[in-house]
Image (cartoon, rainbow, N blue to C red):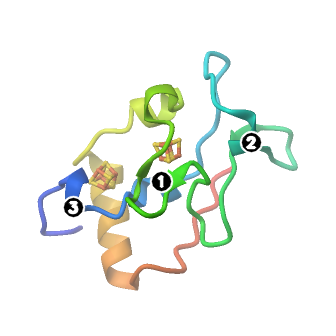
Amino acid sequence: MSGEPADCGRCDAVCCRFPVLLQPGDDVPRRFTDVTDAGLAVMARDEEGWCVAIDAARMRCSIYDSRPDVCRRFAMDGPDCREIRADYNRRGARGIPLVMY
Ligand code: SF4
Ligand code: SF4
């Protein structure tokens, strides 16, 4: 776990490396989406694992107002937030293997 309190304004948006499964009500620009081998609609990710909708210059979501439901429900300072920040800090900025679907 990270000892630092969560602060999205000072975080590299590392939660945006989690796989994001799209839900029926999501309305995301198609260019940011992908389909897994199992046929699941997901947010596409770049070669380093970040969601392609991230604004890399500012490390913020570029589609914030229409972000998927999964992203809306992600809890800042919740268990997943704390765990992925701790992992990121341990390993450095690259190479977190996250495959969940
Ligand atoms: S929710 Fe957590 S991991 Fe995501 S940007 Fe905010 S502090 Fe970082
Ligand atoms: S859609 Fe936005 S909030 Fe969701 S993972 Fe991608 S960049 Fe992050």
Amino acid type of the residue that numbered disc 2 sits on in the rendered structure: Arg
Please name the residue that numbered disc 3 is placed on: 10
- The residue that appears at 50% across and 33% down in the rendered structure is 70
Rendered position, 36 above or below 70: below
Which quadrant holds residue 4?
bottom left
Q: Residue furthest bottom?
A: 91
Mark 1 lies within 8 Å of ligand 2 (Cβ measured): yes
Please name the residue that numbered disc 2 is placed on: 31
Front position among marks 1 and 2: 2
Q: Residues within 10 Å of mark 2 (few under 14, many from 20)?
A: few
Mark 3 lies within 8 Å of ligand 1 (Cβ measured): yes
- Check disc 1 and report its element: helix, strand or loop: helix
- Check disc 2 and report its element: helix, strand or loop: helix
Left or right position of 91 against 48: left
- Residue 44, position in %: x, y? 69, 50
In-front residue for pair 80/42: 42
In-front residue for pair 11/59: 59
The span from disc 3 to disc 2 (Cα, nearest Å) is 28 Å
Mark identifier at residue 46: none
Mark 2 lies within 8 Å of ligand 2 (Cβ measured): no
Mark identifier at residue 16: 1
